[in-house]
Amino acid sequence: MTLLQSLAMNEPLEIDNAQAVVSRKVLWFAICYPTVLTVLYFMVLDGTSTVVQGMVFGIGKTIQFGLPAWIVLRANKERLGAHRLRAAGVSMGVLFGLLAMALIVGIYQWILKPNVAIMSLLDEQVTSKVEGFQLKSVAAYTALAVFYCLIHSGMEEYYWRWFAFKRFLRHRSLGQAIAISSIGFMAHHVIVLGMFFGFENWMTYVFSIGVAIGGAAWAWLYSRSGNLYSAWISHAFVDAAIFWVGYDILFQ
């Protein structure tokens, strides 16, 4: 099986022993690295120049998403090959994505938006980060939203589900692999949410648990369908809801 074919299988996920040689140390590094990068970008570099922030963010993300490809293509000697789009699990992914989207929008409209103190804090934090990326216009913000929904969501699924979760299956049970990868997926979101809501705010941790549940659902869906596209599409719906909330805060 080629690398790209393994990303879009049309059958339950299986692990090829010849390909699963990623060490536990590398996998634990992959689990922890995004949180370290998030602490550096959101906390250590908070208030520094936009050039420095952008440079660190770009280099950090290149390392994050380049690591799995380097390990698989170089260390594991897997090769790239042609693949075709498959539909396994997509309907379930779309359903979960729509439900999560409705939940996010509902929480924002009926719980967060009526709270003046929370909205003031969100406005300050969202504006600060958007300005850090020079995204003050609707067009620039929309371009970023499209990138995150269509591309970055797929990159995160490739990192967290295809690499971290799938490779942990060689060392752990299905339930353990889902839990480890989903907690890792949640961890860096705790930092992000803490910067927006405050680390003393209960919403930071409730919403972080929601992120972990989403990660677990996508890992389970990938394990059932063997099709990363199902999780990718579902993830894209969730990101779309988050960027809609950001748009409403910034421009409405």
Image: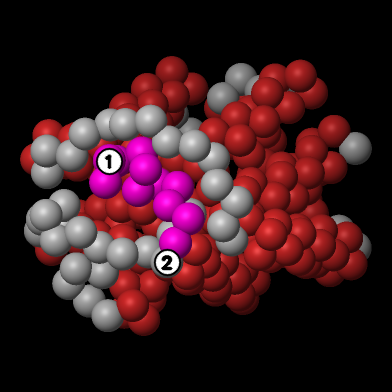
Q: Residue at x 35, y 48 (%)?
A: 6
Disc 1 residue type (three-letter):
Thr
Q: Is residue 115 above or below residue 85?
A: below
Residue 171 screen position, x and y as percent: 17, 72
Residue 26 screen position, x and y as percent: 14, 54
In which quadrant is the C terminus drawn?
Answer: top right
Which quarter of the figure has residue 196? bottom right
Tell me whether circle 1 and circle 2 mark residues in contact (CB < 8 Å). no
Which of the two discs, 1 and 2, labels the residue nearer the N terminus? 1
Spatial CA distance of label 1 from label 2 is: 16 Å
Residue 78 screen position, x and y as percent: 18, 39
Q: Which residue is mark 1?
A: 2
Q: Is residue 76 above or below residue 191?
A: above
Residue 90 screen position, x and y as percent: 63, 56
Residue 12: numbered disc: 2
Q: Which span is picked out in magenta?
A: 1-11
Q: What is the number of callouts on the image?
A: 2
Which quarter of the figure has residue 68? top left
Q: Is residue 241 at least partly visible in the picture?
A: yes
Q: Is residue 50 above or below residue 129?
A: above
Circle 2: element type: loop
Q: Residue at x 26, y 46 (%)?
A: 1
